[in-house]
């Protein structure tokens, strides 16, 4: 390809406060339509908004966790536009001065190197209501109206679909680690607008971007970037110009379609919100939040690599979700072998079954302790690695411990030296012809004796111990 790809992402994260941004209505996705609504969030004349202190604390948390500068004074602005799900006729947002600016996140690029992706700004704002369409009728539900949002605007620093989804996964993981966003993409807790442009390779000047609105899964973000890059390329190659448009991603056709064509910047007639004082954040407030930050993904990754000696890739996968990281550490508590082996079993077996079943690690039918038991059974030679896969499957289906399943399946390896020696001696005594052949130099006959012991023990004899014993008996 003769072009460089430029990607910038805008994320809207719904904050998991109990109540809305400017009123005390409860936030609930499951409540009956229009039951979580008051005078403020339905925009009755004469009502006034009041800050939700928790939402401000959450904004500071994210600012600090993304290496951003927290602005000591920021201002709320009105973004004016009409839409039926926005009864005020304007959205309260931050335009001139957001609560935090100039941050960055570290991600892995496609070559596995660490890459810094800049964050322009983090601003506080509010969600709208929701409209839905029923035949000829349009319905409005204001339960969501006034839910606090953080909008996180990245610099256009990403250049592949993979990088974009790495950035999103990192941001998502930080929000959930901080406990400030449920991060449920199906419910719209975490939504992403994808900006894409291409420019001739090496050129300084950015090309015209298109913006795909509200893409709600990591996979769809990757798909819509790949689609847009291809589309832009075809347009430029055929000598035409990309139009600055706002698009929607159609999941069915896996293509984008035009929502509206922008004429320069949209004119929202921003002006400072007269009903809210400027937001003033003191050093001591920032310090208090800083002191209470949990261990974040990057710190956990470093610690996992150092303390457990697992590769960076594993550490990255295992820390993507806090619960997964906790599972890994809990499993290591009662496990005596190498951490890398545990990491393999979690990443390859456990996560595969959980993904297939569409469940989360919190609901894993195999507890961390049980998985440790299984791996200990392999390491002590009680069962083979191959048998362990079958045992694991049964553990997953039944929720029973490894020991119970191993007994049930009659898999316990026989490592009783005396017993194997007796069986082997009996076989040697009964096969003097083969013994002669072995002694005459036919080494291939050795396998015959091992096979006979296995047959005698239903395959349960410990193979390496069996070989050792037969060798000794045959002299
Ligand atoms: P708007 O709010 O109108 O969408 P912004 O200036 O806030 O405009 O930019 C939105 C996003 O677009 C940012 O994440 C930014 O990094 C990204 N962006 C800006 N220019 C480009 C470009 N030429 N190509 C790709 N992304 C871009
Ligand atoms: Mg935008
Ligand atoms: Zn309300």
Image (cartoon, rainbow, N blue to C red):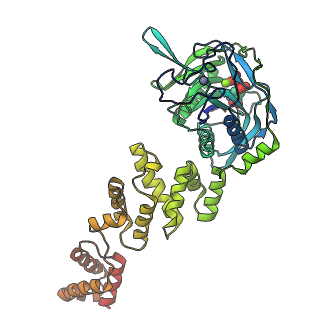
Report which quarter residue 86 is drawn in. top right
Q: Residue 58: x, y in percent?
A: 67, 39
Q: Residue 473: x, y in percent?
A: 30, 89
Q: Quadrant of the C terminus?
A: bottom left
Q: Left or right of 164: which side holds 390?
A: left
Q: Does the rendering let one see residue 28? A: yes
Most foreground residue, 135 or 354: 135
Q: Left or right of 344: which side holds 386?
A: left
Q: Left or right of 201: which side holds 141?
A: left
Report which quarter residue 101 is drawn in. top right
Most foreground residue, 106 or 70: 70
Question: Relative to 30, is 83 above or below?
Answer: above
Question: Relative to 40, is 365 above or below?
Answer: below
Look at 68% across and 17% down and name the residue there.
Answer: 47
Look at 65% across and 15% down and name the residue there.
Answer: 88
Q: Does the rendering let one see residue 10? A: no
Look at 50% across and 70% down and name the residue there.
Answer: 337
Kindly give the residue lying farthest to the left in the view shown.
Answer: 430
Ligand 1 is found in which quarter of the picture? Answer: top right
Q: Residue 34: x, y in percent?
A: 51, 20
Q: Quadrant of the N terminus?
A: top right
Report which quarter residue 74 is drawn in. top right
Q: Residue 21: x, y in percent?
A: 65, 29
Look at 49% across and 71% down and name the residue there.
Answer: 336
Kindly give the residue lying farthest to the top in the view shown.
Answer: 136
Most foreground residue, 209 or 410: 410
Most foreground residue, 437 or 55: 55
Question: Relative to 172, is 407 above or below?
Answer: below
């Amino acid at each position: 390809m003769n072009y460089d790809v430029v990607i910038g992402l805008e994320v809207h994260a719904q904050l998991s406060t109990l109540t809305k941004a400017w009123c005390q209505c409860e936030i609930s996705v499951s409540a009956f339509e229009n039951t979580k609504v008051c005078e403020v969030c339905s925009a009755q004349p004469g009502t006034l908004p009041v800050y939700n202190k928790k939402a401000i604390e959450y904004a500071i948390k994210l600012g600090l966790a993304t290496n951003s500068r927290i602005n000591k004074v920021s201002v709320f602005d009105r973004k004016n536009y009409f839409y039926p799900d926005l009864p005020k006729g304007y959205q309260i947002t931050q335009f001139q001065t957001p609560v935090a600016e100039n941050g960055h996140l570290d991600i892995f690029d496609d070559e596995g190197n660490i890459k810094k992706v800049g964050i322009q700004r983090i601003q506080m704002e509010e969600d709208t209501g929701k409209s839905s369409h029923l035949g000829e009728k349009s319905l409005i539900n204001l339960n969501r109206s006034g839910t606090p949002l953080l909008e996180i605007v990245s610099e256009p620093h990403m250049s592949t679909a993979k990088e974009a989804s790495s950035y999103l996964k990192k941001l998502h993981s930080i929000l959930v680690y901080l406990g400030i966003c449920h991060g449920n993409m199906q419910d719209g807790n975490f939504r992403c607008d994808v900006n894409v442009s291409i420019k001739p390779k090496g050129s300084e000047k950015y090309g015209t971007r298109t913006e795909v609105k509200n893409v709600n899964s990591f996979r769809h973000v990757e798909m819509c970037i790949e689609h847009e890059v291809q589309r832009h390329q075809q347009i430029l190659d055929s000598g035409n110009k990309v139009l600055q448009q706002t698009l929607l991603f159609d999941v069915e056709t896996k293509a984008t379609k035009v929502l509206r064509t922008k004429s320069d910047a949209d004119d929202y007639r921003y002006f400072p919100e007269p009903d809210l004082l400027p937001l003033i954040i003191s050093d001591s407030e920032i310090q208090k939040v800083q002191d209470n930050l949990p261990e974040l993904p990057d710190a956990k990754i470093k610690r996992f690599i150092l303390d457990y000696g697992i590769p960076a890739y594993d550490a990255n996968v295992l820390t993507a979700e806090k619960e997964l990281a906790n599972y890994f550490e809990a499993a290591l508590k009662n496990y005596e072998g190498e951490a890398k082996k545990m990491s393999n079993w979690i990443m390859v077996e456990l996560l595969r079954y959980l993904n297939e079943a569409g469940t989360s690690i919190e609901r894993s039918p195999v507890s961390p302790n049980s998985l440790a038991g299984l791996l200990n059974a392999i390491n002590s030679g009680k069962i083979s690695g191959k048998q362990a896969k079958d045992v694991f499957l049964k553990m997953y289906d039944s929720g029973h411990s490894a020991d119970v399943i191993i007994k049930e399946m009659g898999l316990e390896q026989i490592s009783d030296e005396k017993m194997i020696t007796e069986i082997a001696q009996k076989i040697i005594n009964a096969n003097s012809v083969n013994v002669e052949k072995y002694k005459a130099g036919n080494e291939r006959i050795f396998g015959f004796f091992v096979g006979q012991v296995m047959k005698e023990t239903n395959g349960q004899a410990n193979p390496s111990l069996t070989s050792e014993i037969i060798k000794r008996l045959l002299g």
